[in-house]
């Protein structure tokens, strides 16, 4: 991420491999920067951002929303939870028992799922606490 300008006059450029996301507080400065880049590099404007790093981007006049629905469904499939019902809270009250009735968990698979969930937190901050809590269980 690069920033040009100060105060309320800011131009932001996000670079990922060969893609740029360019935005700013003044439309004219954004257009000038794009023209400068087109002179220096072979580049084209793909229009409004609609998909970036696995997140679907929806823009309207009042807001920008990010969704990772496809990514979340992939997590459910990897964890064999596609048939489960959703919960209103990401973490129900924990109930501990002296009797262990659950099957043993593969630590590598568990760590992989927690790592994948950490990326989902970017668009789902409501699950941040439970993902962090669950990541501490394997320490």
Image (spheres, rainbow, N blue to C red):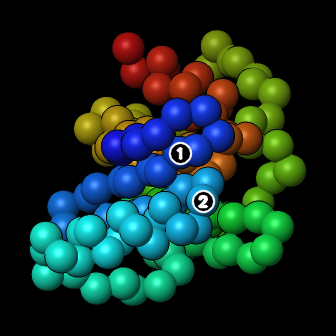
Residue visible at 61% across and 54% down in the picture: 25
- Looking at the rendering, in which quadrant would you find the N terminus? top left
* Residue 81 appears left or right of 139: right
Q: Toward the viewer: 3 or 119? A: 3
The picture quadrant where one finds residue 34 is bottom left
Query: Can the viewer see residue 55 in this picture?
Result: no
The picture quadrant where one finds residue 94 is top right
- Report helix, strand or loop for mark 1: strand
| Residue underneath mark 1 | 10
Location of residue 103 in the rendering, given as x and y in whole percent from the top left corner: 46, 39
Q: Relative to 136, is 102 above or below? A: below
Residue visible at 36% across and 54% down in the picture: 14
Q: Toward the viewer: 115 or 45? A: 45
The picture quadrant where one finds residue 56 is bottom right
- Looking at the rendering, in which quadrant would you find the C terminus? top left
Q: Toward the viewer: 126 or 15? A: 15
| Residue underneath mark 2 | 26
Q: Relative to 84, is 56 above or below? A: below
Location of residue 46 in the rendering, given as x and y in whole percent from the top left corner: 39, 86
Going from N to C along the chain, the mark reached first, 1 or 2, is 1
């Amino acid at each position: 991420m690069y920033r040009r300008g100060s105060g309320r006059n800011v131009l932001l450029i996000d670079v990922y491999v060969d893609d740029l996301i360019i935005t700013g507080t003044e439309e004219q400065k954004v257009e000038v920067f794009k023209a400068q880049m087109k002179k220096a590099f072979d580049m084209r404007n793909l229009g409004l951002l609609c998909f970036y790093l696995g997140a679907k981007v929806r823009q309207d006049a009042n807001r920008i929303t990010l969704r990772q629905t496809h990514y979340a469904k992939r997590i459910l499939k990897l964890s064999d939870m596609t048939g489960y019902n959703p919960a209103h809270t990401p973490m129900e009250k924990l109930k501990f028992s002296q009797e262990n009735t659950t099957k043993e968990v593969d630590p590598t698979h568990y760590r992989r799922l927690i790592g994948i969930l950490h990326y989902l937190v970017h668009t789902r901050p409501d699950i941040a606490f439970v993902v962090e809590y669950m990541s501490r269980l394997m320490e």
